[in-house]
Each structure stands twice: as structure tokens, then as C-alpha cells.
Amino acid sequence: MTDLIKISPSILSANFSKLGEEIISLDKAGADYIHVDVMDGHFVPNITIGPEVIKKLRPLTKKIFDVHLMISPVDKYIEAFSKAGADIITFHPEATENTSKTIDLIKKQQKKVGVSLKPKSSINLIKDHLNDIDLILIMSVEPGFGGQKFMPEVLEKLKDIKKILSEKKLKMDLEIDGGINFENCKLAKDAGANVLVSGSTIFKENSGNLKKNISLLRSN
Ligand code: DX5
Ligand code: ZN
């Protein structure tokens, strides 16, 4: 993966009563990825969408579906999300008994593998898997809801991971997710993130001017 900054708008902050139109607008507004937050009300205290909705959204855009699974168990749903049209499937090692097995299940579906860490989770959970994954997602809020406050303490973890990846000469997406705005996005990039997830900033700032907000996050 390159180090160009990519923006992955989270549809959790979109208008769910017209999700299809919102996907098309994000595509036209220059989103690099579309971040789809899947929540099961068990791993996180919120419930959002499943494979059926992703399947309906898939034909509307060619943009990469960056699917963030905040679900547990996770293994039995990998095939359904793959067939629905996910391109990157990101799971939480905290949500599975066997991280290697979940990685293999995603690879078997020929999808890119992402692993996500909650703010308080250690990088030790993923250290042994770095050669087998395509993306690391660092949560800068407790997973479950959009519009929360950025947790700057995760920037140290981001720097540590960036250092390990550079030492091992591993190239992959380093994605940060939660409370990203025009003020802290530079801190995230300087700490090593090359993919920024944003929901509320992109959908709410500048009267919801998606194109302007995406380019501001990319350039700030
Ligand atoms: C939270 C989700 C995030 C969230 C980002 O559990 O994983 O993707 O939707 O939304 P903002 O940018 O509003 O924090
Ligand atoms: Zn997310």
C-alpha cells in the first residue's frame, strides 16, 4: 500500500433513510474508501447493518468497501460479508478466539485483511500477524458510536506500529478511526496514519459539503 493519504468516510454518520444516494454522493465527492461500520449489539453496544445492506449498496459504486466488523463471533460471517461485496474485511482480535484462523478465512475469500485495535488494546494482539495482513485500524474512540471525542493517547500506539512496520519493511494501510477532524488529522498523519476514517466531520462540517470536507481532511 502507498503512503498517499486516503480518506474513508464512515457511513455510520450518513442519512440511513437514503443510504444509496449517500454512497453515490461520497463516490462523487472523492472518497478513496467507503467505511462501513458493522455492529452487532454484542461486541459493541449498538446495532447497524449486515451483509444484505452491503449487497444492495455494492452496485452503486466501484469504490473500495472498507468493512469494519465490530461483531463477535466473527468467523461465521466472513463468507457472507465477502459475497456481499466487502473489499477489505477488518475484524477485532478481541472478538475472536483465533486471530490466525480469522485471517485465513478472510484470505480464503480473496479479500484484504484488516485488524483493528480498541484504544486500550495492546499491539501485542497483532504483532505475530503483521506478515499476513493488509491493514491495521487504530481506534481513537471506544467502538460503537460516531461523534465521539478523539483519544490522543492512541497516537503513541500509532507511532509504535509505524516504527515496527518500517523496521520490518512492511507496507500496509495504517488507518485511524474515531473523532478525526480538521484539527487532529495532521497529528494522525504525522504519527503514521495514511488512511483517515471520518463520519461526523465529513457529514456535518461546512453544512455537509462532502467534497470540501474530504479534501480538507486530505490536505490539512
Ligand atoms: C465507531 C466507528 C467509527 C465511527 C467514526 O465505532 O468504528 O468508524 O463511525 O465516526 P466519527 O468520525 O464521527 O468518530
Ligand atoms: Zn469504524
Image (tube, rainbow, N blue to C red):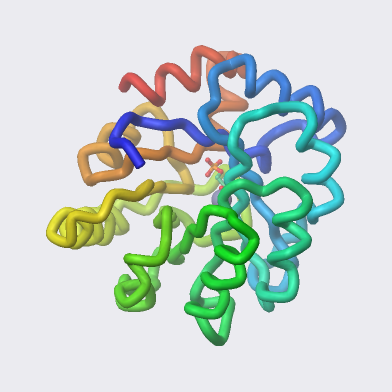
Left of 35 or right of it: where is 154? left
Q: Quadrant of residue 73?
A: bottom right
**Residue 37 image position (x, y, % from top left):** 65, 50
Left of 110 or right of it: where is 82? right
The residue at the point 51 percent across, 29 percent down is 32
Q: Where 89 falls versus 186 (above or below)?
A: below
The residue at the point 76 percent across, 54 percent down is 83
Of residue 144 and residue 95, the one placed in the foreground of this image is 95
**Residue 97 image position (x, y, % from top left):** 56, 86
* Residue positioned most to the bottom: 97
Left of 38 or right of it: where is 18? right
Q: Which image quarter holds the N terminus?
A: top left
Q: Quadrant of residue 56?
A: top right
Of residue 212 and residue 53, the one placed in the foreground of this image is 53
Q: Which image quarter holds the C terminus?
A: top left
**Residue 2 image position (x, y, % from top left):** 32, 36
Of residue 149 and residue 58, the one placed in the foreground of this image is 58
The residue at the point 78 percent across, 45 percent down is 54
Of residue 120 and residue 101, the one placed in the foreground of this image is 101
Left of 182 or right of it: where is 19? right
The residue at the point 31 percent across, 57 percent down is 154
**Residue 145 image position (x, y, % from top left):** 62, 52
Q: Where 95 falls versus 91 (above or below)?
A: below
Q: Quadrant of residue 30?
A: top right
* Residue positioned most to the left: 167
Q: Where 95 falls versus 106 (above or below)?
A: below
Count of numbered tags: 0
